[in-house]
Image (cartoon, helix red, strand yellow):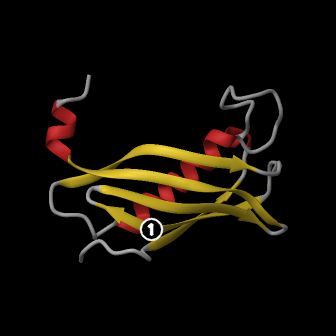
């Protein structure tokens, strides 16, 4: 299966104490951490690509533009969605969003780059 725009995936999370800004050392409030929201969006992006990359390839994060709009408390359920909007050579751009039962929580763009897994690992410091 080849890469094409429109590939998408969705992941869900019930927020626990381990997902909070306090737990991520990203603040001192017990609400869903921005880094955790971003991780959900990256997870959805990777899931959208499953089975669509060439053998021996993977994708790695390149750039993030992300707005965290409202706080979400422990016990809440959120859903992250990623949709592949643009393919420019090896660079893939996703529109991402996170919502809960009340509406939009966060939104942005995530860019990933397709790389040869072995070459990438060999160049890691």
Residue 37, percent from left and from top: 64, 49
Q: Residue at x 21, y 38 (%)?
A: 120
Q: Which residue is mark 1?
A: 84
| Position of the N terminus by quadrant | bottom left
Task: Name the residue rendered at 47%, 72% in the picture.
Answer: 8
Task: Give the image quarter of residue 36.
Answer: top right
Quadrant of residue 75 within the rendered picture: bottom right
Q: How many marks?
A: 1
Give x and y (percent) for residue 14: 70, 57
Please determine whether, in this image, residue 46 is positioned above or below residue 22: below
Please state which of residues 90 and 33 is positioned toward the viewer in this rendering: 90
Could you tell me residue 27's position as x and y percent?
76, 28
Along the horizontal axis of the image, is 27 left or right of 85? right
Quadrant of the frame with the C terminus: top left
- Circle 1: element type: strand
User: Percent x, y for residue 115?
Assistant: 23, 49
Q: Residues within 10 Å of mark 1 (few under 14, many from 20)?
A: many
Which residue lies at the image location 65% right of the left edge and 31% below the top edge? Answer: 24
Quadrant location of residue 79? bottom right
Q: Is residue 62 left or right of residue 122?
A: right
Which residue sits furthest front?
88
The relative height of residue 49 versus residue 5 in the rendered view (above or below) is above
The answer to whether 83 appears left or right of 66 in the picture is left
Residue beneath the point at 49% across and 70% down: 9
């Amino acid at each position: 299966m080849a890469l094409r725009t429109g590939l998408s995936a969705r992941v869900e999370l019930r927020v626990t104490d381990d997902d909070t800004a306090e737990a991520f050392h990203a603040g001192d409030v017990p609400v869903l951490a921005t880094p955790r929201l971003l991780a959900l969006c990256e997870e959805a992006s990777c899931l959208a690509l499953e089975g669509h990359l060439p053998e021996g390839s993977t994708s790695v994060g390149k750039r993030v533009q992300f707005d965290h709009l409202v706080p979400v408390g422990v016990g809440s359920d959120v859903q992250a969605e990623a949709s592949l909007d643009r393919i420019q050579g090896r660079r893939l751009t996703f529109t991402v969003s996170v919502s809960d039962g009340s509406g939009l929580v966060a939104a942005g763009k995530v860019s990933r780059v397709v790389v040869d897994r072995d070459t990438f690992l060999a160049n890691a410091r």
